[in-house]
Structures are given as C-alpha cells and as structure tokens.
Image (cartoon, rainbow, N blue to C red):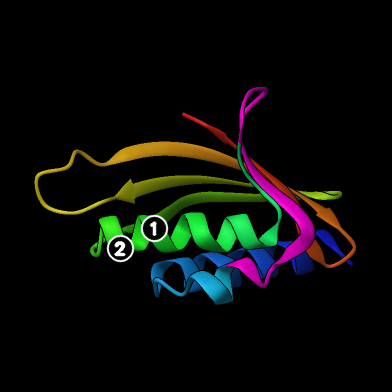
C-alpha cells in the first residue's frame, strides 16, 4: 500500500467520522486497532471499543465534526492536523493525529493535543 493509498483510507475514515457513522469509521481499523493519547493512555483498544467510544461521542455531541487543516503521508504513516468542533457552546480544539497501519487497516491513532 502506498503512502497516498494510506492517506485515502484516513480521509475516508474521517468522512465516516463526520457522518457520525461509528460502524463505518471503526471498519477502517484492524481488529486490535486503537486510539491513544500520544505517548500516553490508550483511549480505546480494539475495533469494537473504537466503534462504541465514538458512538458515545456522536451521541454526546450531535454536531461533532473534524476539519482537516493539513495532511501528510510518509511511509507507513499518515499525519493530520485537524480542528474539531463539538457544537455550540463548546470551544473547538486542534489536534494532530498520527495514524499507523497494519496492511490496509489503521492499527493505531495517536492524538497530540
């Protein structure tokens, strides 16, 4: 899989995230894929936890969306600079997301806030 192909996978995953499709978003992850704080705590371990955790986020913040400000693909990695909007009354925040892959699936995302 080329770096450009990996970037396309991540962009498709973000499109499912923005559609509030937790199943569709999680489908891009390996069975043991995870979402993590950069060099820290595991937020969600396993595809099911990624799905369930994001479903809760979408329920808690129905206007939630992420806008990609910059994107980079290099080797086995994709890096996004995102601005995340939760909804009215909640301050948007920026995050850098580092995606690593196992084959054609996202194996790990690390969030730098």
Labelled pair 1, 2 in contact (Cβ < 8 Å) = yes
Looking at the image, residue 49 sits to the left or right of residue 86; the answer is right
Compared with 98, 66 (above or below) is: below
Return the x and y of residue 87 as percentages of the image width and height: 18, 54
- 83 and 59: which is toward the camera: 59
Q: Is-magenta flag for residue 69?
A: no
Q: Which residue is mark 2?
A: 59
- 36 and 9: which is toward the camera: 36
Residue at (50, 73) in percent of width and height: 16
In the image, the segment drawn in magenta is 26-42
Looking at the image, residue 110 sits to the left or right of residue 55; the answer is right
Looking at the image, residue 66 sits to the left or right of residue 99; the answer is left
Q: Which residue is mark 1?
A: 56
Q: Residues within 10 Å of mark 2 (few under 14, many from 20)?
A: few
Element type where label 2 sits in the image: helix
Element type where label 1 sits in the image: helix
Looking at the image, residue 15 sits to the left or right of residue 37; the answer is left
**Residue at the extreme left of the image, as rendered:** 89
Compared with 108, 68 (above or below) is: below
Q: Quadrant of the N terminus?
A: bottom right
Residue at (46, 75) in percent of width and height: 21
């Amino acid at each position: 899989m080329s770096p450009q192909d990996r970037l396309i996978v991540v962009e498709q995953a973000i499109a499912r995230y923005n559609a509030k499709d937790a199943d569709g978003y999680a489908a891009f992850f390996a069975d043991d894929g995870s979402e993590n704080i950069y060099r820290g705590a595991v937020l969600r371990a396993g595809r099911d936890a990624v799905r369930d955790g994001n479903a809760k986020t979408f329920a808690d913040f129905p206007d939630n969306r992420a806008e990609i400000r910059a994107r980079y693909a290099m080797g086995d990695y994709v890096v996004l600079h995102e601005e995340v909007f939760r909804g009215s009354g909640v301050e948007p925040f920026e995050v850098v997301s580092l995606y690593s892959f196992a084959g054609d699936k996202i194996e790990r995302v690390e969030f730098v806030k």
